Amino acid sequence: MTRVHEHHVTNPATEERVATVPAAAPADVDAAVRRAAAAQRGWAAAAPADRARLLRRFADAVDGHLEELAALEVAEAGHPVTGARWEAGNVRDVLEYAAGGVERLSGRQIPVPGGVDLTLLEPLGTVAVIAPWNFPMPIAAWGSAPALAAGNAVLLKPAEATPLTALRLAALALDAGLPEGLFQVLPGAGDVTGRALVDHPGVAKVVFTGSTATGREVMARCAEQVKRVTLELGGKSPNIVFADADLERAAAAAPGSFLDNAGQDCCARSRILVQAEVYDRFLELLEPAVLGFACGDPADPATAMGPLISAAQRERVRGYVREDEPAAIRGTAPRGRGYWYPATVLEREASDRVAVEEVFGPVAVVLPFTDEADAVRLANATDYGLSGSVWTRDTARALRVARAVAAGNLSVNSHASVRYGTPFGGYKRSGLGRELGPDALAAFTETKNVFLSTD
Ligand code: ADP
C-alpha cells in the first residue's frame, strides 16, 4: 500500500495513541477494485451452500474473538465494554443471518402468455461500504454481510477514527477461508479514499452510513454514474410519552435512549415529548434515572456511558450547549483526560437549534404536548425520520401514532430499533433504502427478467 499518509487512532477515554494505520490512496483503491472483481467472479460462481458455509465459518471466527473485538472497540471508540461485546455479537449474528439467506435468495416465476418468465437475482459485482465511527463494527457488518451473501465482493472503508475492528474482521474473514480479495478493508480519509471508492466505475453500489451532509454529497456523486446507493443518515427522533403510560418504566428507559454511546447514535431519542399533565411528574422521575446512568471508565462493566469520540466532536456538542449553561438535568462526567461530556436534559422551545438539529452527543430536549394530534405534529416537525418511540397503555393509540410518525423504525413501550432480522432505515433526510431484515440480500442484487418462448 502506498503510504500517502497515515491515521493515528486515539483512545477517546485517555487521549492515548492506540495505533497508526496507513491510509489507502486512490491508486490503492484502484488495485483493490481489480482484486475484488477477480475474487467476485469465483465467489458468484461457487455453489450457494459453499458460500453459506464460508460465511458461517466467518461468523464462528467472529464468535471466537468476541472479547478481542470488543476490546478493540473499547480502545478506539471508547464504548463501554458491555456495549462493545453486544456489538461484536451483533456482527456474528448478522453474518449468520446473511449466511442463511444465501440458499433462499430466490427469484420468481411469473405467469405470462406464450412462454415461461423467470426473474434472476444477480449480484451487483463490487460493493463499497463506507462506515461511520459511532458503531464501527455492527454498521460495517450490516452492509458487508448481506452483500457478500448475495454474491458480491466488498470494499469496506472504516471511518478515520475507528479502523481497527474493520481490519481485524478482514483478517478473520481470511482465516475463515473467504477468498483473498473478496472482503478488503481500505482505511483512509473520507474525501480521498471514500471519494475514490464512490467515483470508481468498478464499484457498483455504495452503502453509506454517516452524516446527512456527507450522504447528500455521496448520493450526488453516485448520480454521475447512476450508481446504486443506500444511505443511513442522521436523526432527531422523538420519544413520545402519553399521560396514560407506565411513567416509571418510561422514565427508567429514557436515559438509555439518548445516552447510549454518549448520544452518538443516529437513533437517539433526543426529543422527549411529554403530555402536559404528566410533564412535571415525568421530569421528577427522569432526573434520578439520568443521574444514575454511570459515566466513566469504558473498561468497567458497570459503566453505561463513555466519552465522545474526539475533541472535535465535544466542541460540536458544546456548540449547542456548554457544560456550565443552565439545564433541567445534568449528570456528571470524569474530568481530566478524555473527551467527556455529561448527560444533559434541556427545556427549550421546539424551534430552538438544539431541539431541531442532530447534536450527536448526550443531550436531549424535553417538550410538552397537549394531545395525540399535537404529539404527532411535534414528532413530525423535523426533516429527519429515522426512529421514534411511543409510550402508552392504549394499544390502539400506540398503533395510530406509530402509523402517523414519518419514520422508519418505531418502538412501542420500548426503545429498541435494531434487530438483525428486521428492516432498518430512514424516511425523509434520514436515508434511502433499508438494511438488515429479510430483504437485506435482495438490496445487493439486480433483478433480471428472462422470458423463454414455448412456441
Ligand atoms: P463525520 O463527519 O461524523 O465523520 P461523515 O458522514 O463525514 O461523518 O463520515 C462517515 C464516513 O464517510 C466516514 O467513513 C468518512 O470517512 C466518510 N466520508 C466523509 N466524506 C466523504 C466523501 N466525500 N466521500 C466518501 N466518503 C466520505
Image (spheres, helix red, strand yellow):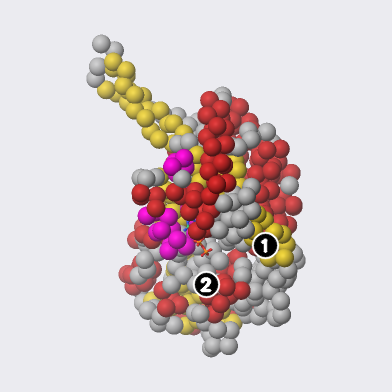
Residue found 74% across the figure and 52% down from its top: 68
Q: Quadrant of residue 163?
A: bottom right
Q: Quadrant of residue 375?
A: bottom left
Q: Amino acid at mark 1?
A: Val
Packing grade of label 2 (10 A; few <14, some 14-19, many >=20) is some
Residue at numbered disc 1:
9
Would residue 358 be seen by someone viewing this image from the given angle?
yes
Instruction: Decide: is 136 above or below 455.
Output: below
* Residue 244 coordinates in the image, percent (x, y): 45, 70
Please name whichever residue, 2 or 336, is drawn nearer the observer in this view of the structure: 2
Judge from the rendering whether residue 23 lies leftward or rightward of residue 130; answer left or right: right
Q: Decide whether residue 212 is among the magenta residues.
A: yes
Q: Bounds of the magenta span?
A: 201-220
Residue found 56% across the figure and 66% down from its top: 264
Residue at numbered disc 2:
247
Disc 2 on helix, strand or loop? helix
Q: Quadrant of the C terminus?
A: top left
Instruction: Decide: is 38 above or below 434.
Output: above
* Residue 273 coordinates in the image, percent (x, y): 44, 73
Residue found 62% across the figure and 62% down from its top: 161
* Residue 349 coordinates in the image, percent (x, y): 40, 82
In front: label 2 or label 1: 1
